[in-house]
């Protein structure tokens, strides 16, 4: 596979799965001590990665769980944030300035802060009350968040299958390598067919809306300098559909939760207008070892693996490094 270091991928993903005992111990302690609300805070891609778990809580639990943008939280505040709040942060590098300021803000208001990162000596790891550390550069954070949210909902009697899911996630490194291998020819074909496209229209819904936002903004825009439109499949028919033309590249992210029908509806319409509709569907990947009832929860993780292969092939055919930036962490702002 193009620029895919399998031993490194396996090791990093295993380091996330290995956090299960620490995460469960932490969640159990917090539940036993009692807290009233949970904030899931990030910036850019790490903010988008919180949405599936806010979505999971919203449809499964009566507990107060919400995602927040780090910079906005600091300037706008949150009336519910206080001594009975728990706030979770994620940062690959542990150096995200907006998140650092948000941690300081939350701690000043008495909240208990948790950080997932790959660097134990990073500013974020040193600043939070509890740092849970993987190998460096481990991404995404879905495994850790599944453990955290799953355990929390389980303790509240709102997720009966958590232990079974957590046991199955022990094999997630191998499962995702299989996904990457299956996705490789699909990714290569998409990149070759779209090497000259400078605009893509992305659609997703449910627990894949966060990934849709992330891939549009953080990959295609930030890393490839491509113009995009991103729209939730439930909102597609309220304006954005007017942008479709016969040659518009439409990229659809299809998952396996209860919102699948909404994305099906958007896909059907898009294909009536555009001759260039690509669907990345998690149902196409076997996920050997994962029970059917959990497949939908893993959709963001599966699509991240699939589209990471697309990113590498776009980098190749467009001769545009995924590490190249003009402004992000280059200029002061």
Image (cartoon, helix red, strand yellow):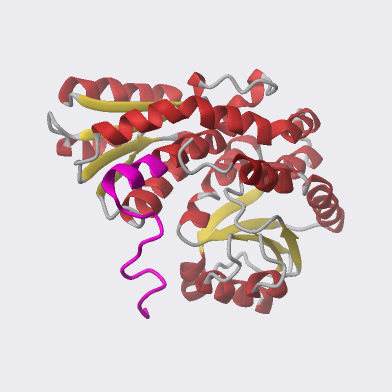
Q: Nearer the viewer, residue 72 or 117?
A: 117
Q: Is residue 140 left or right of residue 328?
A: right
Question: In percent of the image, x 58 and y 36: which residue is there?
Answer: 59
Q: Nearer the viewer, residue 101 or 331?
A: 331
Q: Nearer the viewer, residue 4 or 130?
A: 4
Question: In percent of the image, x 66 and y 76: which residue is there?
Answer: 109
Q: Is residue 148 visible?
A: no
Vertical comparison of 191 with 32: above or below: above
Q: Position of residue 192 (x, y in %)?
A: 28, 33
Vertical comparison of 13 with 158: above or below: below
Image-quadrant location for residue 231 = top left
Quadrant for the C terminus, please. bottom left
Image-quadrant location for residue 222 = bottom left
Q: Is 218 included in the stretch rendered in magenta? A: no
Q: Is residue 93 left or right of residue 131?
A: left
Q: Position of residue 229 (x, y in %)?
A: 26, 45
Vertical comparison of 184 with 115: above or below: above
Q: Position of residue 332 (x, y in %)?
A: 37, 80
Specify the farthest residue to the left.
246
Q: Which residues are magenta?
A: 311-333
Q: Position of residue 267 (x, y in %)?
A: 30, 24
């Amino acid at each position: 596979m193009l620029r895919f270091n399998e031993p490194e991928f396996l090791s990093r993903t295993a380091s996330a799965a290995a956090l299960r005992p620490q995460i469960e111990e932490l969640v159990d302690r917090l539940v036993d001590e009692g807290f009233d609300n949970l904030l899931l805070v990030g910036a850019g891609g790490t903010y988008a990665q919180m949405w599936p778990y806010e979505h999971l809580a919203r449809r499964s639990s009566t507990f107060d769980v919400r995602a927040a943008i780090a910079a906005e939280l600091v300037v706008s505040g949150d009336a519910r944030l206080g001594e009975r709040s728990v706030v979770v942060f994620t940062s690959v590098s542990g150096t995200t300035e907006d998140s650092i300021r948000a941690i300081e803000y939350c701690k000043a208001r008495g909240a208990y802060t948790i950080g997932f990162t790959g660097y134990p000596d990073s500013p974020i790891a040193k600043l939070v009350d509890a740092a849970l550390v993987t190998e460096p550069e481990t991404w995404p954070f879905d495994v850790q968040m599944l453990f955290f949210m799953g355990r929390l909902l389980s303790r509240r009697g709102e997720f009966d299958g958590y232990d079974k899911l957590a046991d199955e996630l022990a094999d997630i490194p191998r499962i995702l390598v299989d996904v990457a291998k299956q996705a490789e020819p699909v990714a290569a074909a998409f990149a070759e067919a779209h090497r000259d496209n400078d605009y893509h229209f992305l659609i997703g819904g449910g627990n894949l809306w966060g990934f849709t936002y992330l891939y549009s903004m953080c990959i295609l825009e930030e890393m490839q300098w491509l113009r995009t439109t991103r729209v939730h499949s439930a909102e597609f028919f309220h304006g954005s559909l007017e942008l479709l033309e016969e040659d518009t590249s439409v990229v659809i992210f299809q998952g396996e939760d209860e919102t699948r029908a909404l994305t099906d509806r958007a896909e059907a319409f898009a294909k009536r207008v555009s001759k260039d509709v690509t669907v990345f569907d998690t149902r196409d990947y076997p996920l050997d070892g994962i029970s059917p009832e959990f497949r939908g929860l893993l959709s963001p993780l599966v699509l991240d693996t699939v589209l990471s292969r697309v990113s590498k092939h776009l980098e190749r055919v467009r001769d545009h490094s995924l590490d190249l930036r003009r402004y992000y962490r280059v200029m002061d702002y």
